[in-house]
Image (spheres, helix red, strand yellow):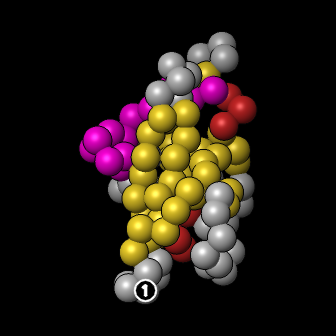
Amino acid sequence: MFYIKAIATQLIDNSAYPEIVLCEFIDVNDKRHNIIEKWPVVSSENFENIFPKDCFIGCVIVEEKADSYIVDTEQPWYIESEEGKTIFEIHKSLLIEMTD
């Protein structure tokens, strides 16, 4: 499975369980994308209210380019940015493959 390397920067809501965090990453055009998501969706670690923290946004590869990937975060968990986007072009260094 593929993931975008992101950074959880703050706790959005700790009144709910699981906790909801703000995650961000930068695309190939240096645009910051913010994603608000439940902590267990973006990390397998136990939640600690310490930021910044590495996290991972699940995605599928739509297209590979010389130095980048176009990815879609709608699959596998219907994740979208605060702007409602699910398609992003990211540097190859931001994409990792992990087994679940």
Does the magenta segment cover residue 97? no
Q: From the viewer's perspective, is 81 left or right of 18?
A: left
Q: From the viewer's perspective, is 55 left or right of 86?
A: right
The answer to whether residue 62 is visible is no
Q: Identify the residue at horizontal 65%, vertical 39% (top origin).
A: 95
Q: Identify the residue at horizontal 41%, vertical 68% (top origin).
A: 12
Along the line of sight, the residue nearer the viewer: 1 or 29: 29
The answer to whether residue 36 is visible is yes
Image coords of residue 10 (percent x, y):
52, 62
Along the line of sight, the residue nearer the viewer: 74 or 27: 27
User: Label 1 crowding class (10 Å Cα cut-off): few <14, some 14-19, many 20+?
Assistant: few
Image coords of residue 26 (percent x, y):
55, 33
Along the line of sight, the residue nearer the viewer: 25 or 14: 14
Residue of label 1: 17
Image coords of residue 66 (percent x, y):
66, 13
Q: Is residue 76 above or below residue 90?
A: below
* Range covered by the magenta-colored residues: 80-91
Q: Quadrant of the rendered structure where residue 87 is?
A: top left
Q: From the viewer's perspective, is 50 left or right of 29?
A: right
Q: Is residue 88 above or below residue 83?
A: above
**Mark 1 secondary-structure assignment:** loop
Extreme residue in the left direction: 84
Q: Identify the residue at horizontal 43%, vertical 81% (top origin).
A: 14
Q: Identify the residue at horizontal 44%, vertical 39% (top origin).
A: 33
